[in-house]
Structures are given as C-alpha cells and as structure tokens.
Amino acid sequence: MRIRQTVIGATTTLAATLGLLATAPAAGAAPLAPAVPLLPHSAAAAATTGPICWFGACYDYVNGRQVTDASGATMRMMVAAPAIKPGDTDSHSLQELALQSGDQKSTVEIGWTVDLGLNGDLRPHLFVYHWVDGAESCYNGCGFVQVSHSAKAGMALPAGSAARFAIQNVGGDWWVFYDDQPVGYFPGSLWQGTYTRAQMISAFGEVAHASGSTCEQMGDGKAGTAHGSGWIDDFHLIGATDRSHLTVTATSPALYDAGRVTPTSFHLGGPGTGPC
C-alpha cells in the first residue's frame, strides 16, 4: 500500500492450482505504513497508541499478525465498499494479506482497496503491491506479471461478496491468488533470489486519512464488535511448521475495532468519527 501525499482444506485447491504453475513463463507509490506493534493475543483486539502518522497522512489498523517462517498464507475475507471523504484522492480504505521478510523490508501484498486517487471511483478493486529491500514500488505493476485473463490486478470487485486471497512462493517467484485463480506473480529476480520465505504474515484492515481527520470507514462501516461487520477468516499458513494463530491489535479501537476473534479469524471495521 502507498502513502500519498494487508490447512489442509483451505490449501488443497490452491495446491492443485499451483501444480499447473511449474511451466509458467519467467518475466522480466508510496511506502508501506509502519508495522503495527505486536501485542498479546486476546479474545478482543488489543489497543495500541492511536493512528500512525507520517508523510502528511495518518493510518489506522485492525491487524491480525503471526511471526513464523512460511512459504505462503491464505485467507477469506468480505469485500466491502467503505465510505471515504467525497472527492478525496489521498485517502483510502482497504483489507489485505501481506507477507514480509524477517526485517520487514521485503513484502508481497494482495487485497482490495477503495481509493479514488488510484482507481478513479469508490468501488472496491483488487490490488497487488510489493516492496524490495525497503524500496517502494507501485500498485499492480513494477515487475508484476499478470497471468489470468479473468482475475486481473486493478479490476473492480462486487461489494458484499466474499473471496479467498492467497500468496505463495513457487519456484522462487511470489504468486498471488484471488478465489484460487492465479492472478500473476512477482518474479524472484526482483529480490535477486534472496526473498523466498516470509517471517511476518499479516491480515488486516487499513484506513489512510489526512492528519486529524478520521471520518473514513473501515470494512462495511460497522464496528468489528457489531452484528454484520466485515470479517477475515479461514486464515492458514502454507509450508510452515507452526500452527496458524493470529495476534489481533487495533490502533484506535474507539473508532475501528475487532470482534469475535479466534486464532484464524476476526471481525473488523468501524465508522471512524462518522460521516465526512
């Protein structure tokens, strides 16, 4: 994401899809917001210290995270159309899955975002993004190799739907999946072959807003503790010896919070301070 101014049953279909990728052809902005501090797992999201602000913007998170060593991860989540300030091309609201290296400098991401400046409308759109050794890139490009003719990075998604999102390293390349379809991949050569496994896995909602303004919605605009709120579930690691277990935190739980937290799922969202 940019600053202007992410078990067996869950992975069987994905693994089968990956079997088709062995012969896939090789291919030849703004920074990821700071990591949300890790706090102990609890039945409700733990709170941190409020929005993370830098470069003229502020970021709020409801974040599920696991420190591990894995070749990939998969999850399902609700696609929503959260409201952002009308005409604001600098704010966004998104949900994503992100895999990072141990030093958090290399990252692969897939998710959906409502971002007027990026997409030109207020519908949710599929996005992919990556970081290389701490260097920013761009949405849906900068070396990304599109493979699918139907699941395309940047395409609009139906609000209110549910979909599976996944990332897995296959043969040294980072493949991203939408509803078990291989969208495409980031070639391992982007990292000179040095990034092939992830040590930090995150599944989260994020709102970016102007400093001092928090009226943007997260998820479907309902608090994570409310009935009918947005959600992330069926989270599972791929190629790891650890059991899947998310630690869930919230930067500003009075505005955006989590509910119904389990080791592999949670609800999330909120209205911010109310309509812009």
Image (tube, grey):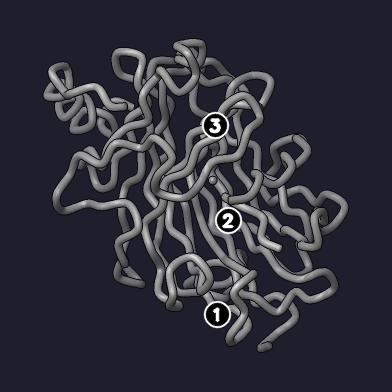
- Report the side of 267 relative to 59 (left or right): left
**How many numbered badges does the structure rendering display?**
3
Category of crowding for the residue at label 2, using alpha-carbon neighbours closer than 10 angstroms: few (below 14), some (14–19), many (at least 20): many
Q: Nearer the viewer, residue 241 or 260?
A: 241
Q: Position of residue 138 (x, y in %)?
A: 50, 47
Cα–Cα gap, marks 3 and 2 = 17 Å
User: Which callout, 1 or 2, points at the residue further toward the start of the chain?
Assistant: 1
Residue holding disc 2: 205
Q: Amino acid at mark 3?
A: Thr
The structure residue drawn at horizontal position 36% and vertical position 21%, both measured from the top left corner, is 169
Image disc number at residue 172: none
User: Which callout, 3 or 2, points at the residue further toward the start of the chain?
Assistant: 3
Category of crowding for the residue at label 1, using alpha-carbon neighbours closer than 10 angstroms: few (below 14), some (14–19), many (at least 20): many
**Quarter of image, res 28:** top left
Q: Tell me the mark number nearer the camera, choosing from 3 and 2.
A: 3
Cα–Cα gap, marks 1 and 3 = 27 Å
Image disc number at residue 83: 1
The structure residue drawn at horizontal position 20% and vertical position 42%, both measured from the top left corner, is 181
The structure residue drawn at horizontal position 47% and vertical position 72%, both measured from the top left corner, is 228
Q: Position of residue 4 (x, y in %)?
A: 66, 60
Residue holding disc 3: 107
